Image (cartoon, grey):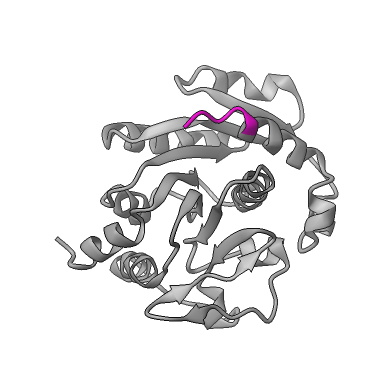
Amino acid sequence: MDPRIASINNNVGNIKNVIAIVSGKGGVGKSIISTLMAIQLAKMGYKVGLLDTDFTSPSTHVILGVKDVTPIEDKGIIPPEIYGIKYMSITYYTQNNPIPLRGKEISNALMEILTITKWKSLDYLVIDAPPGISDIILDMLRIEWNIKFIIVTTPSKLAMETVNKLIKLLLEQNAEIIGIIVNMVLNEEEVKEIEKLKVKILSKIPFQYDIEKKLGNVEELIKTEIFKEIQKITLNLSL
C-alpha cells in the first residue's frame, strides 16, 4: 500500500462528506457545476472545500476568478479561502503553465496534494475530477472517507457512450452514485436515453448561451439559471 495513504486518511479524518463530480468526457460543464455547488454549500453555512484534481487542464480557478493568491505553508499547505470556500488547485504552483503528466504521474500528483493539504474540519469537500475514466477515480476510492459521486453529462450520443462506461466502473467498485446532472439540454427529447439508465437524474439544466461571459465573476454566476438549478440539487442532497 502507498505509505501516503495513512497520512491522507489522517488529513481527511475530519471531512464529513466528499462529493466527487465526474464526467465521461470533457466539455460538459463539470467544472462550473463543481464550483457552483461548492459556492452554494458555503452559502448554506457549511464548511466547504473545493479541490481541483484536473492537473493537466485545471479550470476552477478561472471560474472563481482566482488571481494572486498563495496558500499558507505550515507543516503542510493550508488552502486559501475564496468566497467562503477552502480552495486547492495545482495552479497555485504552475502559474498556468502546461503540465504533461500521464498515468502513474497523475496518481502521484493526487496522492501528493492530498498528503500535503491540511483541510482541518469540513462538512463537504467537493472534488472536480478530470474528465474521462481515469486512475484518479480508482485512487479516490482507496482513501478512507465518505465519498459519493455525481456524474455530469450532456445529452449527446458521444457523451452517453462514456457515461455508460463510467457508471459501470463506479458500480463495479461499489461506489455510491448520488445521481446524474444532464447539462446543456435543448429539449426534453434529448434526455430520453439518459432516463433509461438506472441512475437518478438530479437535474436537466437548459443550455445557456451567455455562461462563458460570466466566468471569473462569481457575483454574475450566482444570478444564472444554472446556479438556480444547482441550488435545487444542493438543497435536496441527503448525505
Residue at 58% across / 38% down in the picture? 153
Q: Could you say where residue 156 lies in the image, as x and y percent from the top left?
A: 62, 35
Q: Could you say where residue 27 lies in the image, as x and y percent from the top left?
A: 62, 51
Residue at 37% across / 73% down in the picture? 116
Is any atom of residue 53 visible in this view? yes
Q: Give the range drawn in magenta.
A: 235-239
Above or below 6: residue 23? above
Q: In this orientation, which residue lies closer to the viewer: 182 or 70?
A: 70
Residue at 47% across / 23% down in the picture? 199
Q: In this orientation, which residue lies closer to the viewer: 65 or 42?
A: 42
Q: Could you say where residue 8 lies in the image, as x and y percent from the top left?
A: 30, 62
- On screen, residue 35 versus residue 10, left or right, reads right
Occupied quadrant, residue 204: top right
Is any atom of residue 184 visible in this view? no
- On screen, residue 152 versus residue 217, left or right, reads left
Q: Does the magenta stretch include residue 238?
A: yes
Q: In this orientation, which residue lies closer to the viewer: 15 or 8?
A: 15
Residue at 52% across / 33% down in the picture? 160
Occupied quadrant, residue 1: bottom left
- On screen, residue 104 versus residue 165, left or right, reads left
Q: Is residue 175 magenta?
A: no
Q: Is the magenta stretch mostly helix, strand or loop?
A: loop
Above or below 6: residue 172? above
Occupied quadrant, residue 121: bottom left
Q: Could you say where residue 28 lies in the image, as x and y percent from the top left?
A: 62, 45
Total count of labels: 0
